[in-house]
Image: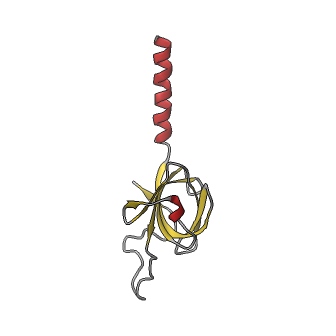
Amino acid sequence: MRLQLSIAATIALLVVATLHAHEKYRIVGVVQDRQVDQMRVKTKDGHRFTIYLDDKTVYQREKKKVPKSDLKNGQTVVVDALGDGEDDLGAVTVNIVPAISSPPSGKPPSANGRGKGRAELRE
């Protein structure tokens, strides 16, 4: 009995450690290529990300769940993802949003220095 409890506790600790190993990212861009298990998203400055999709990925539009089939090439998305780096991203939530227009000339696209095409590391 003690051995079984010890094994169960070890497995639980490994699962918790694995969950904390990933960083949170937010990607804003346009879907360039959607496959069954991944999509490529291009940001405004041209940086491309491959983001993996699975059965746990939630798809939304206007804060309401939508089927995965609603996600199409050419749509603007805001993706919350987890990964060990920008080349290892798994989508948690894919928000389909209206196309983002360019700001009027002379105004910076971001007042806080973020969102310049790289994945934004979330705290």
Looking at this rendering, what residue extends furthest in the bottom direction? 105
Which sits in the foreground, 56 or 29? 56
Which sits in the foreground, 108 or 99? 99
Q: Position of residue 18 (x, y in %)?
A: 50, 38
Q: Position of residue 17 (x, y in %)?
A: 48, 36
Q: Quadrant of residue 123?
A: bottom left
Q: Position of residue 100 (x, y in %)?
A: 44, 77
Taking the spot 45% from the left edge, 82% from the top edge, the residue there is: 102
1 sits left or right of 73 in the view: left
Q: Vertically, is 7 above or below 120?
A: above
Taking the spot 41% from the left edge, 83% from the top edge, the residue there is: 103
Q: Vertically, is 41 above or below 1?
A: below
Taking the spot 52% from the left edge, 59% from the top edge, the residue there is: 68
106 sits left or right of 76 in the view: left
Looking at this rendering, what residue extends furthest in the top direction? 1
Q: Vertically, is 93 above or below 3?
A: below
Count every numbered label the image shows and give the total: 0
Q: Position of residue 33 (x, y in %)?
A: 62, 67
